Each structure stands twice: as structure tokens, then as C-alpha cells.
Amino acid sequence: MRVPVLIVDDNEADRYLLSRQLAETELVGRIFEAQDGDEALSFFLEREHKAMEFPDDYPPKFVFLDINMPRLDGYEFLAEFDKIRGTNELESVVIMMFSSSEQLEDRKRAMAFDFVSDYFVKGQFSSEQLASRISRHI
Amino acid sequence: MESAPETDDEAERIAKLQSYNVLDTMPEAVYDDIVNLATNLCDTPIALVSLIDKDRQWFKAKVGLDAPETPRDVAFCSHAIHQQNIFEINDSRLDDRFHDNPLVTGDPRVIFYAGAPLISPEGHKVGTLCVIDNEPRTLDPKQKDMLMRLSRQVAYILEQRIVSHQLDVVNQQLQTANDELSQFSYRASHDLKSPLISIRRLADFIRKDIGDQQYDEAIGNTKKVSNLASRLEDVVTNVLALHKATDTPDRSESFSTIELVQGVKEDLHWLFEDSGCQFKTDHVADFNMFHEKVRIQQIMENLVSNAVKYRDRSKETCQVEVKCQEKTDRIAIEVSDNGVGIEEKFHDDVMGMFKRFHSGLSEGSGLGLAIVKKHVDALQGSINFTSVPNSGTSFFVSLPKGLGGPP
């Protein structure tokens, strides 16, 4: 079974690169995209509407989340997501960070949320590594 | 009773006292030590460091007295600050000026008083170091000399407060600059590194696509590489511009508003050609100014190119308008557009570094308005804006008229 994912990144090329790597894992089905945290948050707030539109794929199993983005950045999204998780039946959603920052503080700050399972540094992981992390949760 | 008049230098004297930031502060050991020395030296029960404020005398240090302050018009020290040397009253009950003073007839019963003025380096007498007794006395010449010496110590310590306050201010500025720098290098390295990583990864895929004969995919990916490379260029250019905006010597020159706007038009003509935006300059008043043209032009160019980048593509015509006006003592520049606007919740962050508020519209460096702000600050001007989402944004820059003038 292939799982749906959401990629949240303001950079089009980075969304493309991750989509391709995810396709190579052969574990992922539908890929939703959001250009920043604000769009991603709306995506989860419009649960009823989206669930009707994508009955098989909503909510996505994984969210790949960039940190530095306009409007709502990755951290702000995590804080907001934390608030709506319970009420919007999103407990099954696993967030994996996807950032170019190698700073330990960034890693710690993101991983402090218990629904954040992994921290990928852009350009520093293979499709095999991606597959092994994903298969832990499915 | 006779109250002392104000000093001749009253305004400057008060200003000096205020510059010490000492009034109503907590006791400090260094002043307490000196009043203790003074009581011992003169063998009196009371010694004070008294500062003469507008309407009161306030005691920075005191021995033998509880009151924190008294009204100025009954203060012996108000008289003492008219003297260059020790002001001594041996028996106030016999002195016309003081015999009926409430401080003499009631507590603390000031019968003997000797005060040495606290003289600032500029010559303002901000207060006294004084000793008081409840019975008549006379200081001997040695005690007077020592009391004067101690008063000079107090004046010196007061003066040091200014130096240490300045150090605090400079330290605070350094701290802020340091924080800004570390924030800056974090973001700059992110914004430089992130497109580079993507370019490397895209190159891997392009190789793979060509191997798999997926030429369309490969061509699409080379376009992505170009976009990322332009973004990198943009970041590097703007980081340099930001640095220059912070740290450039004043190069004022004489120029007309028409020349200025013409320069902006020429520099940005490609932007208008590519976007199809209209550039309106009908309300640019023609006048000359003596100013740092380079900075003003960069302010305009950044604001105008933002207006184009964040145009509302759903509108039939996109308009950007520049206005210049000469006011009595200011120059007013306005750049307005009918673009997508900025949501109110982001208004406070607009001038910050690496701030972007629109996803998908433009992949700018987020430094444009930070550069504008640095230039405006350097020109001692001000900037503000109004913005309504989906309706448009107007930036208003106000600059002082030419700094100085041509030599």
C-alpha cells in the first residue's frame, strides 16, 4: 500500500526534488504540496472539505516540513499544528522535517514536538534512507 | 528666614545634575563611606551628600538623618551652592537668614552647618557635601581643607556616572549589533546554501534523465537550475547592497528629481517590459536637491521593483506610481501600487531582514526593504506604509532637505 504525503516548502525545486526521491521509495502515493506553513495549516483546517475531495488520501500519513518559509515558518506551523491535532483527528499524521539547516538547535527545537519523528537535511539523504524511515511508520 | 535665590547657571546646572541619573537612586557604599569619613573628620553627628534639584534637596548619602529630602527653600545647601569654598554657619540661631528656619527651630535642629560645593568639571555646583551639628561649632583650617578635598571626590565619582552610562549604552549597541550579525549569518548561509544544494541534486537528476532519455524532464530541470542560480545571484547582490547601505561614506551631490526618476526608469526598464506594468511619474515635482543620490535611487528602485514583483496578476493593468514633493523642510517620496498588498498581521515585520510574505509570487532574498530601511536611516529620514490586501500598497519616505549643501 502506498501512503499519501504532504510536502510543505516554499521552494518549487525542493518540492520537486523531494517528490522524485519519494517516488523512488515506491512507498508513497499521492503527493500534496503547500507553499508555506500558512497553506499547510489551511489544508488541515479544511478537514471535512478535503476528506470529501480525497476520501482515500486524507489526511496524509506524512508531512515533510521545511523550516524557513514566508508567512508561517516551520516552527510556527508546528506550534499551530500542535493546537489543532486533537480536534481535527490528525493524531495519525507523522511530521518529518526537511530543511537545509544543519544547526543542532534547529534539530532539537523541531524534535521537541512528539509528533515530529525525523529530521532530514536537504541533499544529505538517499532514497533508501528515506524509504527505511518511512517504512518504520507503515 | 531668607531663601537662597536660584544660581545664575540654574538651567545648565539642573541639566548637569540630571545627566548624572543619580536622583532617587539607591544608596551606594562609595558615597556612604565619604559621609562617614566626613562626620569623623569634623566630629559632627550628621553628614550628607545633598543634591540640589529644582524644588528640593535630595540626599544621595546620609549619616545621622532619616529624611530622604527636604524642600529647597529651607535648605542650607541652597546657600552653599553659591559659594566657591566652604559655606559655614557657626550658630544659625544668631543668623538673620536662618534663625527662624524650620530646620533650625524643629528637627533636625541645624545649629552648626558647613557645606563644601560639589563642582562639575564645567563649574556647575550640583550640590554639597555638608556636616551638621546640634550645637555651635567652628571647623579648623585643616578640617575645612579635608572637607573640600572630600567634596572633590564626590564630584569626581558623580562625573564617572556619565562615563559608565555611556559605556552601558555602547555595550547595549554592541550586543544588538552582535545579535543582528549572528541572525544575519545564519539566514544568509541558509539562503546561499539552500539553492546550491538543490542545484547539485537537480544536476544528479538531469544526468539520470538524460541516461533514461527523459529529455523533457531534463530540460525542465535545467530551467529549475537557472531559476535557483538567479535566486543565488539575487541574494549575493543584496547582501552586498545591504553591507554598503550600512557602511558607506556620505557622497552628497546635486541632482534633480527628474534625473533621479529617469535613472530608476532606465535601471528597471526590463522589469516593466517583462511584467507589462505601467510606470507612472506624472506627479514627480521638478526640483533640485543636494543629497546622497545613490541611496535615494536605491530606495526608489527597491520599492518600485517590489511593487512590480508583488503585482496583482488578476488585475487588467498593473500600476506603479512614483511621486516626489518638496515640502518646507522635507522631501516626500511616495511609491504606490495596485498590487496584492501585505496582510495586516505581517505589517510589524515588513522592514526585517530575510522577511518574505508571499509564497509562490516571488523568490526574493527578503532583504529589499531591510536595505531601504538602512538607507532611510542613514539619510536621517523616516519611512512608513499603508497596505490593503488585494488593493495595493503605498510606501512613504520622508527625508530631511539636503544635508548641508554644496561647498
Image (cartoon, helix red, strand yellow):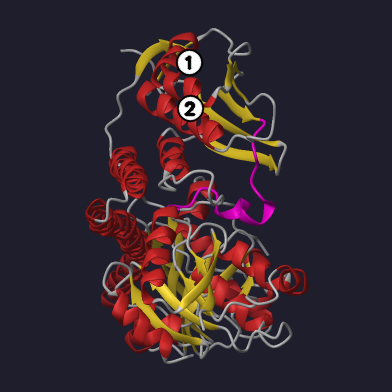
Q: Which residue is mark 1?
A: B261
Q: Residue at the spot x=30%, y=39% of the render?
A: B237
Q: Left or right of B59: which side holds A135?
A: left
Secondary structure, mark 2, is helix
Q: Is residue A42 above or below residue B341?
A: below
For residue B312, say whether it is visible: yes
Separation of disc 1 and disc 2 at Cα? Answer: 8 Å
Contact (Cβ within 8 Å) of mark 1 with mark 2: yes
* First in residue order: circle 1 vs circle 2: 1
User: Residue lying farthest front?
Assistant: B213
Q: Residue at x 35, y 79 (%)?
A: A130
Chain containing the residue with disc 2: B
Residue B213 vs B186, above or below: the answer is: above
Residue at image mark 2: B300
Residue at point 64% right, 62% down? Answer: B55
Amino acid at the residue labelled 1: Val
Q: Residue B364, percent across and down?
A: 43, 44
**Majority secondary structure of the magenta segment?**
loop
Is the residue marked by circle 2 packed among few (<14), some (14-19), or many (20+) residues within 10 Å? Answer: many
Name the residue: 32% across, 68% down: A122
Q: Which residues are magenta?
A: B338-354
| Quadrant position of residue B42 | bottom left
Is B138 colored magenta in this rendering?
Answer: no
